[in-house]
Amino acid sequence: MMIQSLVDVLSDAATDYSLRAIHIRGAGDDFCAGADWVATNSADGKRPRTGDLVRRVPHAAHRVIELVHTIQLPVLCSVRGWAAGMGCNLALAADFTVATSDAMFWEPFMDRGFSPDSGSTWLLPRLIGVARARRMLLLGEKVGAIDAADWGLIHQAVPTEDYENAVEELLARLAGGPTVAIGLTKQALGFGQGATLSESLTQELFNLELSCRTSDFREGLDAFRERRAPQFRGR
């Protein structure tokens, strides 16, 4: 199952200290069309066993979103074509999403007659506000990549001919950064969304204590003194 494979890959990546960044992209013309609810629901019309979704989804789609959001590595999604349902939310959970200008983002839950999952009700209001979140979730509005970038839903929309270069340049920049400091900053951003200013200041202090003990911190200071670009090693 693709979702379980993604959970396994992300879980392994979380403790692989040779990695500096994660890149998620679709294998075909579309990034992700979401869960195949036709295939996973029987043709005879029988309802799933009571409690089935409550038992399965937290360890599948929801786990993917949690891992992407919390993993101590920068995550880049590159999107062509459609990013729908869970695919849309996967792109939203990433730290950066770069899309071709003709890509489309869609939360199709209402059109299928069921309520949203995979973090959409948490991610959308924080990224684009409640009013636009309602448009996407309650009305099922499809959002083109250019509007998505203007709204702050994704990082960047680029013409198709510039797409590969834009993705590679951003990925190289993330992979060449101070990995520990990036991870701690990502953690603090997530923590701060549900914390007070005082709590966030305390969290920043603890993270600062950790990041100042890294080799990359020393390299950053040396590079500043020597007036050169830092060569971070992710340690």
Image: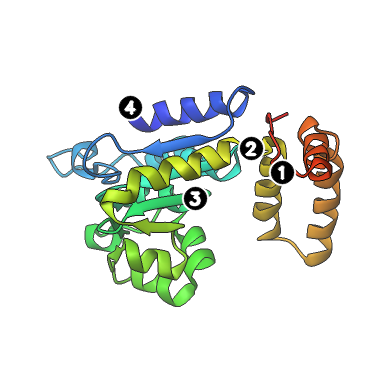
Q: Can you identify the residue that label 2 sits on? A: 72
Residue 2 visible = yes
Identified at 27% across, 65% down, the residue is 142
Q: Say which amino acid is labelled 2.
A: Gln
Instruction: Say the numbered circle drawn on residue 184.
Output: 1
**Relative side of 126 to 35, left or right:** right
Q: Nearer the viewer, residue 59 or 163?
A: 163
Labels 4, 2: front one:
2
Q: Say which amino acid is labelled 4.
A: Met
Element type where label 4 sits in the image: loop
> Toward which corner of the image does residue 222 lie, by quadrant?
top right
- Along the polypeptide, which appears first: circle 1 or circle 2? 2
**Relative side of 34 to 120, left or right:** left
Identified at 40% across, 51% down, the residue is 98
Residue 62 visible = no
Q: Nearer the viewer, residue 9 or 4?
A: 9
> Toward which corner of the image does residue 192 lie, by quadrant?
bottom right
Label 2 Cα neighbours within 10 Å, binned few <14 / some 14-19 / many ≥20: many
Instruction: Say the numbered circle drawn on residue 103.
Output: none
Q: Can you identify the residue that label 3 sits on? A: 96
- Along the polypeptide, which appears first: circle 1 or circle 4? 4
Q: Is residue 3 above or below residue 128?
A: above
Instruction: Say the numbered circle drawn on residue 1.
Output: 4
> Picture coordinates of residue 108 (x, y %)?
27, 58
Q: Is residue 81 above or below residue 196?
A: above
* Residue, far left: 44
- Along the polypeptide, which appears first: circle 4 or circle 2? 4
